[in-house]
Image (tube, rainbow, N blue to C red):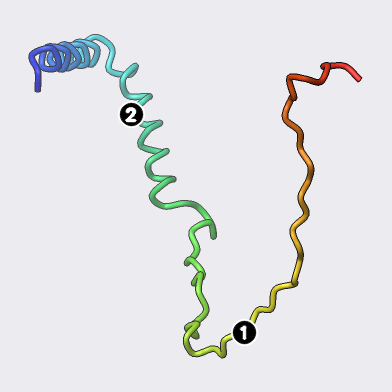
Amino acid sequence: MSLLSIVILVLVVIGIVSQTISNPYQLLIPVVVFGVIYLLYKFPPGGVRTKAKPRYKTQSRKDQPAKSKQRKNMPFRVIEGGKDDDNLPKYH
């Protein structure tokens, strides 16, 4: 840790301690809110937390017969593009 990060950490701790001594309820509200959010994240209400369904079939691909895929014979088409020829004018 660098000297700057240590100084900032010490100032944060001093600020939290002084805020707790002067007005403890102002610090208590954010702690309670973050605690409730954490508990809702960890233990979601209702049936939100369900077991994940398996993504893959139980039978592996090696056990299944191989399907022969036939590709359609599609000839390629050449689309005539044109480079700008310096000898031709730019207008029609």
Instruction: Return the x and y of residue 47 as percentages of the image width and height.
Output: 54, 60
Nearer-N-terminus badge (1/2)? 2
Q: Which residue is mark 1?
A: 67
Secondary element at tag 2? helix
The Cα atoms of the two marked residues, 1 and 2, are separated by: 60 Å
Instruction: Name the outermost residue toward the right.
Output: 92
Residue type, numbered disc 1: Lys
Check the image and report above or below for 66 versus 89: below
The residue sitting at 37% across, 25% down in the picture is 30
Q: Position of residue 50 (x, y in %)?
A: 50, 63
Label 1 crowd (10 A; few <14 / some 14-19 / many >=20): few
Query: What residue is rendered at 53% in x and 56% in y?
Result: 48
Q: What is the secondary structure assignment of the residue under circle 1?
A: loop
Tell which of 4 and 40 is nearer to you: 4
The count of marks equals 2
Give the vertical position of 46 relative to 51 (above or below): above
Residue 7 falls in image quadrant: top left
Residue 92's disc number: none
| Vertical placement of residue 49 versus 55, above or below | above
The single residue placed furthest to the front in the displayed view is: 87
Q: Quadrant of the C terminus?
A: top right
Q: Check disc 2: other Cα within 10 Å, few if <14, some if 14-19, many if 20+.
A: few
Disc assigned to residue 31: 2
